[in-house]
Image (cartoon, rainbow, N blue to C red):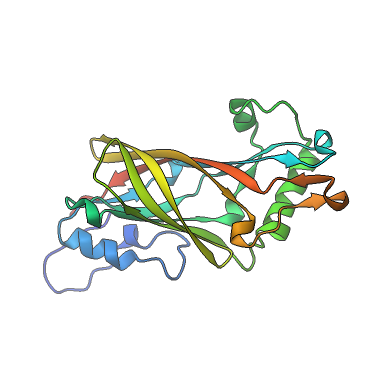
Amino acid sequence: MLSLLAGCAPQVEQQPFVLPSQPAEFPSDIYLGAAHRAQRVYRVDASRSLVVVRVYRGGRFANLGHDHVVASHQVQGLILWSEDWQSRRADLFAPLASLTVDEAALRQEYALTTQPSERDVAGTRDNMLNKTLRVSANPFVSLHIQALSEVLPTMPVQAEISLNGIVRSKRLDVQVEQKPGEMWFSGAFSLTQTEFGLEPYSLLGGLLRVEDEVDISFKLVAVEFIPGE
């Protein structure tokens, strides 16, 4: 944990604000400055956080395909929980190369009725990363979130989602649960792949395809940063 020490000596213990593999434009300095001003800053605990994307089959031959569950266990980010609700914000990101496809436990949780083979799963992940998302050129999905109200426990926010070089803004309702030293955030929303310039994967001239709209749910656990620890 970052130690904020008084005085002018240079400090090197600022790792909580330099997140692993963060995008070059990630605004760490905003949160570091807020912490210096004794504002409440939280860091997402990736080990206890999860984002799930449900992807659906479509087309006339849809019965030959599978619905899929895509997951990220590596969501990272920082949250500023200011006393002034208008200053509350979060910046989050996830490395797309870390996405998983069709974890058995998640397929069971979401009651998916078909069972793709290991080869199917590997092929789906390869197509998703390299043909649809093109992760070599677009390694991250990033979000900037701003509170729209102080209403709790369901807090409306404006989320700017950056993917494939395109930014789209969406209004979301986020469930907020405050615990000692932690905050929990959860919610769900939908988006389309084409609004981010992505082409849903298809075969046989579209007779078997991935539907454009996907459903996203998330649970984020964030731990408070305490200066001096």
Could you tell whether 142 is left or right of 126 in the image?
left
Residue 96, position as x, y percentages in the image: 58, 55
Q: Which residue shows up at 45% across the image and 70% down it?
A: 24
* Depicted 63 relative to depicted 215: above or below: above
Q: Which residue shows up at 41% across the image and 38% down it?
A: 186
Q: Which residue shows up at 63% across the image and 54% down it?
A: 193
Could you tell whether 35 is left or right of 49 in the image?
left
Q: Quadrant of residue 179?
A: top left
Tell me, yes or no, if residue 13 can be seen here. Answer: no
Q: Which residue shows up at 22% across the image and 65% down it?
A: 33
Front-most of residues 228 and 18: 18
Tell me, yes or no, if residue 194 can be seen here. Answer: yes
Front-most of residues 208 and 23: 208
Residue 3, position as x, y percentages in the image: 22, 58
Residue 129, position as x, y percentages in the image: 67, 56
* Depicted 58 relative to depicted 158: above or below: above
* Depicted 124 relative to depicted 5: above or below: above
Could you tell whether 55 is left or right of 181 in the image?
right
Could you tell whether 189 is left or right of 39 in the image?
right
Q: Quadrant of residue 22?
A: bottom left
